[in-house]
Image (cartoon, rainbow, N blue to C red):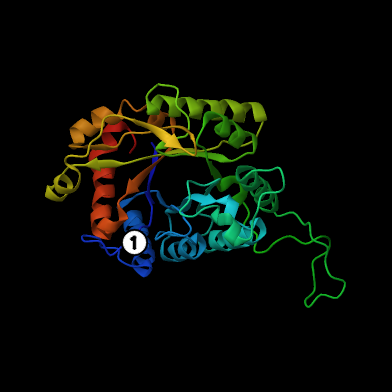
Amino acid sequence: MKRIGFLSFGHWSDAPGSQTRTAADALLQSIDLAVAAEELGADGAYFRVHHFARQLGSPFPLLAAIGAKTSAIEIGTGVIDMRYENPLYMAEDAGAADLISAGRLQLGISRGSPEQVVEGYRYFGYEPAEGSTDAEMARTHTEVFLEVLKGEGFAQPSPRPMFPNPPGLLRLEPHSPGLRKRIWWGAGTRATAEWTAQKGMNLMSSTLLTEDTGVPFHQLQAEQIQRFRDAWASAGHDWTPRVSVSRSIFPLVDERDHAYFGGQGDDQDQVGYIDGGSARFGRSYAAEPDKLIEELAEDEAIAAADTLLLTVPNQLGVDYNAHVIEAVLTQVAPALGWR
């Protein structure tokens, strides 16, 4: 069995064919798709977070709204860029959203991807310390965030508070017990996956790795997962982590599927450059269900992960994306032992 959810980039545009033309469309359709996915039996509704872009940039109102409209599906991000975050304020928002959803938040965080603007985090009021990098700043923010999620008191109470305080140092409120174990780090390399394990976070790995060893993407990603699990065992944590991978998977079962994706099944990885270094992009899958089953059975990283996130083309609308999710759940997943 494998948890299967969707990952939406939350794009909107007024381009021809787009059914998601405004920010309001993107937000409201995201809620509707999460509701539909839950009804279909999917396990997760995850959303990308990007600033200065026509995409979803403020996740917690959306996550809380989905939590209030659903009852079982996991709700998450993939990922929040920690360079932009006040970790204490973020902990309060995350705690509130998790309580509204009755403990279903699965929060993916990371250093973030290439930006729409130059050093956008500076506009949010954050600058790396002298001699430090933006990536190191993201990790510092993360470490503070993880610490305050423990729910331990750290703030000196006022001797003349407006309302009575509990004894001792004060913690952030609202506190949601268990959320600390539901934080994921989006790792782009094998070394970062090992750091993720050392810090006690779940591993989130996408269709991109910012390194290349010449082996197929799925094998490099499977190695990343194994190194994460080895590092986890060495760290001595007392709980079992989760691992997710994301894939673009489109079963061709009707005319719409063939029209949109019939010529787009790319059976080759792509190698390029990001932030001045080599990167390997994983292939996409688009074929009739029988062929998809054969191809996906060879994907070593999907086999190693416990969670699969289906990247969805959100601008094609709620109904079509629900159709794609249903096709994977009913016509592909059972034959692979995922259901």
Q: Residue 219 falls in which quadrant of the image?
A: top left
- Is residue 140 positioned above or below 159 on the image? above
**Can residue 95 be seen in this snapshot?**
no
Q: Which residue is located at x 56 percent, y 45 percent?
A: 111
Q: Which residue is located at x 14 percent, y 48 percent?
A: 259
Instruction: Give the x, y percent position of residue 304.
Output: 43, 29
Instruction: Give the x, y percent position of residue 336.
Output: 30, 32
Q: Is residue 11 left or right of residue 294?
A: right
In this view, the residue farthest toward the left is 255
Q: Is residue 105 left or right of residue 333?
A: right
Indicate the secondary structure of the residue bearing disc 1: loop
Q: Around disc 1, counting alpha carbons within 10 Å, would you say few (fewer than 14), some (14 to 19), or many (20 or more)?
A: many
Who is closer to the viewer here, 21 or 87?
21
Quadrant for the C terminus, please: top left
Amino acid type shown at disc 1 = Trp
Q: Which residue does the numbered mark 1 point to in the structure image?
A: 12
**Can residue 210 be seen in this snapshot?**
yes
Who is closer to the viewer here, 102 or 278?
278
Q: Which residue is located at x 67 percent, y 64 percent?
A: 173
